[in-house]
Amino acid sequence: MPELSELVGGRRLILVSNREPYEHVRSGGVTEIRRPPGGLVSALDPLMRRTNGVWVAWGSGNADRDAADRSGHVPVPPEDPSYVLRRVWLDESEIEGYYQGFANSALWPLCHMFAQHFEPRSDDWEKYRLVNERFAQAVAEEAAGAADPVIWIQDYHLALVSATVRTLVPGALIHQFWHIPFPPPDIFQLMPSAMGVALLRGMLGNDLLEFQTERAARNFLACVDELIPDARIDPERQQVQSEGRTTTVRAFPISIDVQYYEGLAEEPAAAELAAKLRDRYTKKGRQLAVSVDRVDYTKGILERLRALDLMWDRHRELRECLVFLIVATPSRSALAVYKQLEEQVVEQVERINAKYRTRGWTPIVLIPENVSADRLAAIYRAADLCLVSSLQDGMNLVAKEFIACQVDERGLLLLSRFAGAAEEIEGATLINPFNIDGLADGLKAALATPLAERRARMARMRYDLHGATIFDWLRSILTAANELRPRPPAGVRPARV
Ligand code: GDG
């Protein structure tokens, strides 16, 4: 683990996200501490452990209040506390309006360019504003007394936080990472104009605004150009000047803890499980394809199923040649559109299986639940092919996890050109998931790719990934933020790059 703490330059780091890194959950009279799955927490928790900072997040666990003090503070990690988690409390109507409503039913679909799911309700917007205010207040309380704090906000749930914090904590260095795409002006302007302007102004409260891709950064600048009259944009420097302040806007593609995933895949238990999976699914020269997603309309799960159906329909000879394992983890099930998609996925898999199944062959194996990280690593390791068919995706970490876990270097990666990862990964086969015919042909061609070519491409991708891990991502963001506003001397060592 690199020494990242120095890159915060000895300042107090206050990290702000919707999701918390540790959740206290009571079930059957027993309270347990859970770490929500996902790349963000596993990347940022090690950083926080080394910075003595504060992580401000929504206290979402049903036993979170009992575990926190009156100010919402809990020392974490529980086994060996080294930083403080500051929980922000939300009631049911706030969760509905801010989280399920404005964040996940307005901003999420808009940023992924799904106009048909875009529902910008004014009640939700009010809750979103209120909750962003509350986060900003909590940040200001945590920053009180710190000489020169650095505030790092995560994602689209908290677009208004930086501007408010700036008024409450003048002089703080504030930056934000936006994990999802950012749409071009024609799409962004579907947002009611008062909300759209407030969102852009909110984001311009940051000293540095970090996107996954150059495209997202460019789109943001174009939206500011069209909608914020006083803004002056310097495209060379990727900077916006507005209301007497400067915001730098740049791309920092996120990654994964490559050694962690590789290590999981190399565990003897994972090797054994991978061998078992191959034994079960790759009989008679069959290939094993996998996909792993939260069930979300942005991930192109139904498009993937249509392409498989088309391929098997057109090419009888490819029946029995491939088993497709789909890990589809339920997500945001409180929203009707997500619940409905979960049902559609099950229906479509059943329909396709009924159409093509033979005595010894089931075409699609659906795992409609969350699987453990070690099992996931074994699944990635066992596969001959991984298909990422996102219709839009900020980055897509699954593509990178697949590469890290391919320790036997046999798998091909079919990657949507609309995932941020496509801008970076050389060696994947890029696909267009809107083109069902083309995707079906792409799958057919992938099945015929010789092993030597697969190995060469995977070896290249693995090499590149080792040079661009989550720690490189953290280092480049923290360095860029520090360079914008180096800490005044006073005996503090400068950041080491
Ligand atoms: C957002 C952006 C961006 C999924 N099922 C299981 C499981 N997962 C894990 C994967 C991966 C994560 O969830 C999904 O990450 P993605 O990047 O694919 O997508 P989002 O959740 O939409 O994330 C995205 C990301 O933020 C980071 O910036 O890349 O573009 O949309 O880590 O492995 N993990 C386990 N069991 C499952 O069943 N253990």
Image (cartoon, rainbow, N blue to C red):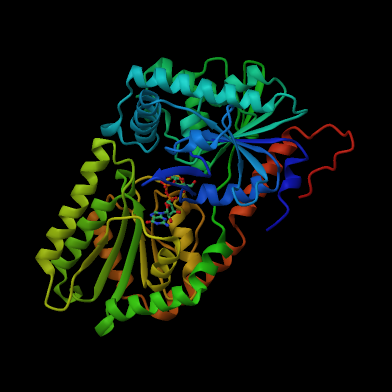
Left or right, residue 340 beside residue 44: left
Residue drawn at x 45%, y 75% as measured from the top left: 269
415 shown above or below 107: below
Residue 447 spot, x, y in % from top left? 30, 73
Residue 459 spot, x, y in % from top left? 52, 72
The residue lying toward the viewer, choosing from 70 and 51, is 70
Residue 346: quadrant of the picture: bottom left
Residue drawn at x 70%, y 42% as measured from the top left: 52
Count of number-bearing discs: 0
Left or right, residue 487 beside residue 13: right
Residue 451: quadrant of the picture: bottom left
Check the picture and name the quadrant holding the N terminus: bottom right
Left or right, residue 431 beside residue 342: right
- Whether residue 370 is visible to the viewer of this picture, yes or no, is yes
Farthest front residue in view: 29
Farthest right residue in view: 491
Residue drawn at x 36%, y 47% as measured from the top left: 28
Farthest left residue in view: 355
The residue lying toward the viewer, choosing from 358 and 15, is 15
64 shown above or below 245: below
Residue 101 spot, x, y in % from top left? 34, 28
Residue 336 spot, x, y in % from top left? 24, 36
The residue lying toward the viewer, choosing from 91 and 215, is 91
Left or right, residue 490 beside residue 396: right
- Whether residue 18 is visible to the viewer of this picture, yes or no, is no
24 shown above or below 204: below
Residue drawn at x 23%, y 76% as measured from the top left: 321
